[in-house]
Structure formats: structure tokens, C-alpha cells
Image (tube, rainbow, N blue to C red):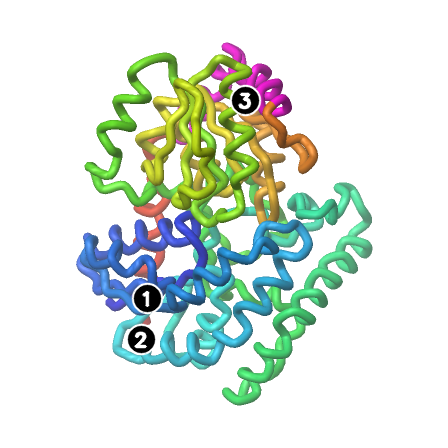
């Protein structure tokens, strides 16, 4: 079987597809990763085929736009960025999938993959990393920008709300999508956020206790649990960072995700918060220009560390609420201070608060003083005990191992 794994985004979006590819390759299948160009070397290191879904320049242009992290402007920004890529991505995925015994596994945002499926070129599964993008009236996800549907609303009101969300999606991407659909002989799509999930199989890469299945979720959704792949290959956890973590009291880790290029103010506040707490800190970003020129004693900088090895050595992690960091911290039993920006991040923050393992700060609560006060509330024996209990629930199960045979079952 030839499995094509199609995704866009940064590490949190790409690593689960890579990890699934590793599982499927170990089971004897040919695997091709279709992803942003910067992940070519990672695929080669792991023995996976690779084709670029976006160029390095296109990926860099997306990450350089500050609207990527705005709660309301992020959707329109991504629609503008991705609209022109659809025809080229369809051609690439259709060519890859045209061979015998091919199966597609795609991030919902790769709309071209659904077109390949509709043209009956090959079967497809959607790999859904987070519950925050599932429309629901019975348990509405928390939306960015304060646009959440209140719980307990009458069902007609809920249906109108989700119809309005779909109308917004159609306004943003419907023109480009439906022009391509017309060229392919397909009827127009009106409800984009109903259509973009595969009708054959949706693999939820999260457990039922993190997001309880709802009666109005898609019937084809199966929950596999959190995936455990985070890009680490043994030696990727640098000896000097490991030694730093073990050389004194556990540090607090600070990150806004691998895609954040506008985090200089956050990292200044993080370094100052460590000073206020008299705590050690580790600042994580791929973009060193965001790090203060002078760091206080006990605070150091790291470009990358695999979170499943790093976070068990940390007293807490301060982050943006991305599902990859969220899941790794839950597995490690590490308290989480969440500063959500956009996308699914507010929903993840709400779920962490509900589990009693995290605290959320609002957009005007990002100073060193705010961080220090919240971390004092977070780093307590009671919170650590709840974090350990949740880590026991995560256990050693790897959702990617669970999902691999489901993908095999799609082969015609």
C-alpha cells in the first residue's frame, strides 16, 4: 500500500503525520509525506518519501505575517495565503494517489485532498489533531475572539450559528475552491466546515476523556488517543540542555510554538518573570532574534528540544495552547500556563482548566508580573498531584499505533 500523508503548518501540524508515517513504514508500506519544503530532510532521515506541498518561501511568508496569530484576522489571512495553492496541490496529490493501492491521510486544511477523494482517485482519512474544530451544539468548542456558542442554546439557534460559521468559510475560500471544483466537474460546496472532513474516516488524535464524544459529532469519527511522536530521534535532546535541566531546581519552559516569529515581548516577559520568581527558565524558539540579548542567571535559550523528553524535567510550561504542546505536557504530568492566541488554542486552554492542570491568561495578562503570579498559583503540590493523575490516564498508549491499522483498512 502507498500512503500519502498531506499536511501544512508547523511542527505541531506536521509531526503527527510524520509519526503516523513511521508507524506505517514499519508495517511494510510505502509512505510519502506531502508537506512544507522545510520538512524534506526530516522525511529523508526517517526513510519516508517527500514531495513539497508548499515551498520554503511560501511557508516563510505565512509565518512572517503577524495576522497568523490574531484571533479574528487569522482565518482571512490563511484564506488569502492558501487560495492560489489549491490547483497545484490538487495536481500533486492526484498524481501521487493515481498509483495502485494508494490511500490519502490529510489535515482538514488540505482542501485539495478532499477533491482527490471526491474524484474517486483514492480513499482518504482525515487526521484530526484537536477537538476544537468540530462543530457541535451539544458541547460547543471555545472559539477565538469571543465567538463561542453559549452552551444550552436551543438547537435552532445552534444550527443558525454553525450555518453562519460555514457561510464565513465559504466567503473566505468558497470562490477559489468552487472554481476548481467546476473545472473538475464537481458541484459547488456551500458548507465548507462540514465538507472538509472525510466521509470515510476521521481519526481523532485525542482521547475520549480529553473531549467526550458528542451525539452531533461525525459518525465516521474514531478516537485513537494522543500521538507520541514529537520529532525526537534519540540524540535530538542536546546534552547541554539536559544537563541544565538537571543541574538545579526544575526550570520553567517557555514557548509560543515553532511557528511564532513575533514573540520578542513574550520572551522578555518570560525572562523577567523568572527573575521575579527566582526560578530557572528555558526559552524555546527556532528564531533567536526573539531572545533578549542578555538573559538573567539561571535562564537559558534552546532552539529545539523534544517535549516528551524535556517536559518531565520541568516545573511548568508556559505556552500558546497548541495541541502538540498540550498533549506532551499532559503525558509528562507538567502544569501548564496557557496564553492562547488563535485557532484551537482557546479551546485547549478551557479543557486544561477543566482538568485542573492548567491556568489560562487573557490577551491583556502577558506581563512578567502576570506570568509570575499565575506560575505561583500553578506550581503547587495540589496541581502537581492532579497533573500526575492525568499523566497516568495518558499512559504509554500511542494513538499513532492505534490509527495505523485503521488507515490500512481504507485500502480498496
Which of label 3 and label 1 is nearer to you?
3
Q: In this picture, which residue range is highlighted in magenta?
A: 369-394
Q: Is residue 147 above or below residue 410?
A: above
Whether 382 is among the magenta residues is yes
Q: Is 48 placed above or below 338 here?
A: below
- Which residue carries the number 2 mark? 96
When asked about the image quadrant of residue 295, the answer is top left
Marks 3/1 in contact by CB < 8 Å: the verdict is: no
Cα distance between the residues tagged 2 and 1: 7 Å
Disc 2 crowd rating (10 Å Cα; few below 14, some 14-19, many 20+) is many
Residue at image coords 39%, 80%: 91
* Residue 224 figure quarter: top left
| Mark 1 lies on residue | 4
> Looking at the figure, which quarter contains the C terminus?
bottom left
Cα separation, mark 3 vs mark 1, equals 44 Å
Left or right of 228 in this view: 340: right
Q: Observer-nearest residue: 352 or 123? A: 352
| Residue ID at (21%, 64%) | 30
Q: Nearer the viewer, residue 332 or 393?
A: 332
Tell me if residue 68 can be seen: yes
- The residue indicated by pointer 3 is 273
- Quadrant into which the N terminus falls: bottom left
Q: Earlier in the sequence, mark 2 or mark 1?
A: 1
Q: Circle 1 — which element?
A: strand
Q: What residue is shown at x 38% (from left), y 62% (from top)?
A: 36
Task: Look at the image and tell me whether residue 333 can be seen.
Answer: no
Amino acid at each position: 500500500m502507498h500512503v500519502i500523508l498531506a499536511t501544512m503548518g508547523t511542527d505541531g501540524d506536521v509531526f503527527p503525520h510524520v509519526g503516523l508515517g513511521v508507524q506505517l513504514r514499519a508495517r511494510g508500506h510505502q509512505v510519502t509525506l506531502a508537506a512544507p519544503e522545510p520538512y524534506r530532510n526530516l522525511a529523508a532521515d526517517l526513510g519516508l518519501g517527500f514531495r513539497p506541498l508548499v515551498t520554503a518561501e511560501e511557508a516563510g511568508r505565512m509565518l512572517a505575517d503577524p495576522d497568523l496569530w490574531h484571533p479574528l484576522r487569522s482565518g482571512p489571512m490563511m484564506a488569502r495565503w492558501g487560495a492560489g495553492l489549491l490547483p497545484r496541490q490538487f495536481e500533486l496529490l492526484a498524481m501521487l494517489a493515481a498509483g495502485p493501492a494508494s490511500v490519502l491521510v490529510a489535515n482538514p486544511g488540505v482542501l485539495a485532498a478532499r477533491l482527490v477523494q471526491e474524484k474517486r482517485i483514492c480513499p482518504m482519512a482525515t487526521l484530526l489533531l484537536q477537538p476544537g474544530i468540530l462543530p457541535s451544539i451539544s458541547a460547543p468548542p471555545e472559539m477565538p475572539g469571543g465567538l463561542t456558542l453559549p452552551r444550552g442554546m436551543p438547537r435552532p439557534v445552534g444550527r443558525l450559528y454553525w450555518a453562519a460559521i460555514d457561510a464565513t468559510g465559504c466567503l473566505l475560500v468558497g470562490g477559489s475552491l468552487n472554481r476548481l471544483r467546476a473545472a473538475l466537474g464537481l458541484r459547488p460546496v456551500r458548507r465548507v466546515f462540514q465538507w472538509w472532513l472525510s466521509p470515510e474516516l476521521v481519526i481523532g488524535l485525542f482521547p475520549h476523556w480529553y473531549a467526550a464524544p458528542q451525539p452531533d459529532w461525525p459518525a465516521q469519527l474514531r478516537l485513537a488517543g494522543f500521538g507520541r511522536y514529537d520529532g525526537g530521534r534519540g540524540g535530538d535532546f542536546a546534552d547541554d540542555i539536559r544537563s541544565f535541566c538537571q543541574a538545579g531546581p526544575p526550570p520553567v519552559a517557555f514557548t509560543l510554538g515553532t511557528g511564532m516569529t513575533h514573540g520578542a515581548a513574550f520572551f522578555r516577559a518570560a525572562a523577567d518573570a523568572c527573575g521575579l520568581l527566582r526560578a530557572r527558565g528555558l526559552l524555546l524558539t527556532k528564531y533567536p532574534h526573539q531572545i533578549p540579548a542578555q538573559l538573567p542567571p539561571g535562564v537559558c535559550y534552546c532552539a529545539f528540544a523534544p517535549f516528551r523528553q524535556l517536559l518531565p524535567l520541568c516545573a511548568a510550561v508556559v505556552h500558546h495552547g497548541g495541541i502538540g504542546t498540550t498533549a506532551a505536557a499532559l503525558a509528562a504530568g507538567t502544569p501548564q500556563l496557557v496564553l492562547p492566541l488563535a485557532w484551537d488554542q482557546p479551546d485547549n486552554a478551557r479543557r486544561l482548566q477543566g482538568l485542573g492542570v492548567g491556568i489560562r491568561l487573557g490577551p491583556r495578562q502577558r506581563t512578567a508580573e502576570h506570568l509570575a503570579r499565575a506560575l505561583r498559583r500553578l506550581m503547587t503540590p495540589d496541581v502537581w498531584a492532579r497533573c500526575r493523575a492525568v499523566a497516568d490516564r495518558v499512559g504509554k498508549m500511542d494513538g499513532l499505533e492505534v490509527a495505523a491499522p485503521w488507515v490500512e483498512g481504507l485500502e480498496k
